[in-house]
């Protein structure tokens, strides 16, 4: 676990650095957000899920955000219009690309999902999944079958 903590800190720092750099370039000012200042909101994709937008606007265009999915939460087969880049910060995300085998992505793992690719996503039981997500267009989720399933407690 002692080796994992520095990786989490490094990955979080990289995500926040990218966010700060993008905003600083557009506004010509530094952006410094201690973790306690980051604003989290409910994510309508799943009950119990949260989102903290770092830059851009996921409703209208390109963005970078931190997201959480509760442990045991599942997103049935779905696609997104635009490509996604994801870095897992906590928990274990299980991604299954259509036609492929499930891949467990633990802390420090990276995923690139092309737009239109059918996949499922699950946060393994035991710990909530927090991840950094970047997309060059507005956020969307188009379910092919099923919906999001929040964990039952």
Image: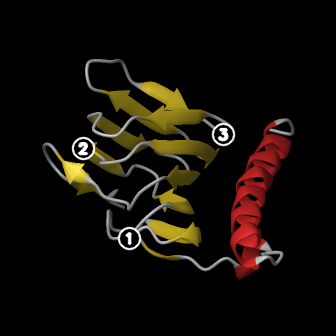
| Residue at mark 2 | 78
**Circle 2 crowding by C-alpha within 10 Å: few under 14, some 14–19, many from 20:** many
Task: Pick the quarter of the image with the C terminus.
Answer: bottom left
Q: Residue furthest top?
A: 100
For the residues labelled 1 and 3, the Cα–Cα distance comes to 29 Å
**Circle 3 crowding by C-alpha within 10 Å: few under 14, some 14–19, many from 20:** many
| Residue at mark 1 | 60
Position of 2 with respect to 87 (left or right) is: right
Give SS at disc 1: loop
- Rendered image quadrant of residue 54: bottom right
Rendering coords of residue 67 (x, y %): 52, 60
Q: Nearer the viewer, residue 110 or 9?
A: 110
Give SS at disc 3: loop
Q: Residue at x 30, y 34 (%)?
A: 117
| Residue at mark 3 | 107
Rendering coords of residue 34 (x, y %): 80, 74
- Rendered image quadrant of residue 39: bottom right
First-in-chain label (2 vs 3): 2
Q: Residue at x 38, y 70 (%)?
A: 60
Rendering coords of residue 126 (x, y %): 53, 47
Q: Nearer the viewer, mark 2 or mark 1?
A: 1
Give SS at disc 2: strand
Residue 37 vertical placement versus 99 (above, below): below
Residue 130 in view: no
């Amino acid at each position: 676990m002692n080796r994992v903590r520095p990786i989490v800190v490094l990955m979080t720092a990289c995500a926040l650095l990218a966010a700060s750099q993008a905003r600083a370039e557009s506004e010509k000012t530094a952006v410094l957000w201690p973790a306690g200042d980051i604003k989290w909101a409910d994510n309508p994709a799943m009950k119990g899920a949260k989102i903290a937008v770092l830059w851009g606007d996921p409703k209208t265009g390109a963005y970078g955000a931190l997201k959480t999915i509760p442990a045991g939460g599942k997103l049935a087969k779905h696609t997104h219009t635009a490509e996604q880049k994801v870095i897992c910060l906590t928990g274990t995300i299980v991604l299954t690309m259509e036609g492929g085998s499930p891949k467990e992505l633990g802390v420090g793992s990276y995923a690139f999902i092309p737009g239109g690719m059918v996949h499922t996503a699950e946060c393994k039981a035991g710990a909530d999944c927090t991840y950094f997500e970047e997309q060059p267009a507005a956020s969307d989720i188009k379910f092919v079958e099923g919906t999001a399933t929040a964990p039952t407690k």
